[in-house]
Image (cartoon, rainbow, N blue to C red):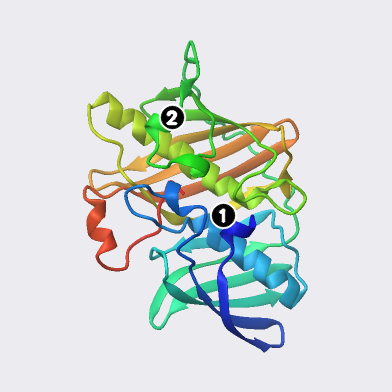
Amino acid sequence: MSAGMAPTVLGEQHDGDGCTLQLAVPAELDCFPGHFPQAPVLPGVALVGWALQLAAPRLGTSAHCGAMEALKFQHILQPDDRVTLSLRHDKAHGKLHFAYRNGETAYASGRLVLAASQGWQTDDRVPTAPRLPEPQPIAELLPHAGAMILLDALLEHGPEHALCSCRVPAAGLFHDADGNLPAWVGVELMAQAIAAWAGCRAKAAGAPVQLGFLLGSRHYACNVATFAPGSELLIEARRDFHDDCGMGVFACRIEAPGVLAQARLTVFSPPDASALFQSPATEPSHG
């Protein structure tokens, strides 16, 4: 990730194949103006990036992963918050286990598969709706702003489905040192496609775009470690389940020549998101 996205390390302890770090969330992180303009929240995907980047020099692990397992975002982190990150390298299975906590409060956790996956071979295609005559600008559909808008346009949408595009830029908040976009950022692209679907529904109803929160994914897999600059990605989201309280499950995929990523994301869009900022709440679904 860019230098403007790094946490502050306050202290650390090492123990064999693991380590524990005390972190502070800098108020000046580059993501906060766009995530979200109404109330700054650390994107859940940044916690994945922090785990990988902090583990690499300390545990000798890869800074990339091709899959994520049991991914959970349980509470939001905001500017100046402090949290403890526990890392453990499971060498036998090539996985990095991470967990963010503050006392008894769990913020996020998961298992990162450090070797790139071969991808999923499946016929579970996301059904498509007729293409829009012209791609629709994405900004008006998302609660994000500025550099945190990672998608370029809405190409299709329907009652159960949205298809978005992203031409990978040469630089960005989450790019690695080689100028590539890590595959783990795919979960954020998927979450923003879900947000675009929700934004279409809100616009059709004459309602404002609402904040949403990513609760997690049982399994995200991508057959490449990074998305190269200039790659034309198609990001699809299909609603599997959605209730009146704002809970939802979406089947998502990212495709490009030689690229396939898939996951099912569980999300939550509360009627009144402001209540979530008064006490620990869930990590945002649109990023």
Tell me residue 193's x, y (percent). Answer: 47, 37
Q: CA distance from mark 2 to mark 1?
A: 20 Å
Out of 99 and 13, give the one closest to the viewer.
13
User: Which residue occupies the extreme top position in the image?
Assistant: 133
Dot 1 amino acid type: His
Q: Quick check: 143 above or below 153?
A: below
Of the 4 image quadrants, the one containing the N terminus is bottom right
Dot 2 crowding, Cα within 10 Å, few <14, some 14–19, many 20+? many
Query: What secondary structure is marked by label 1?
Result: strand
Quarter assignment of residue 242: top left
Tell me residue 34's x, y (percent). Answer: 44, 46
Q: Which mark is residue 219?
A: 1
Out of 223 and 177, give the one closest to the viewer.
177
Out of 71 and 198, give the one closest to the viewer.
198
Residue at 33 percent across and 54 percent down: it is 39
Tell me residue 2's x, y (percent). Answer: 64, 55
Q: Which mark is residue 161?
A: 2
Q: Which mark is residue 102?
A: none
* Left/right of residue 256 with respect to residue 150 in the rendered view: right
Dot 1 crowding, Cα within 10 Å, few <14, some 14–19, many 20+? some
Q: Quick check: 146 above or below 220?
A: above
Query: What secondary structure is marked by label 2?
Result: strand
Residue 91 visible in this rendered orientation of the protein: no
Tell me residue 214's x, y (percent). Answer: 42, 53
User: Which residue occupies the extreme front position in the image?
Assistant: 28
Q: Quick check: 86 above or below 283?
A: below
Q: Are marks 2 and 1 in contact (CB under 8 Å)?
A: no
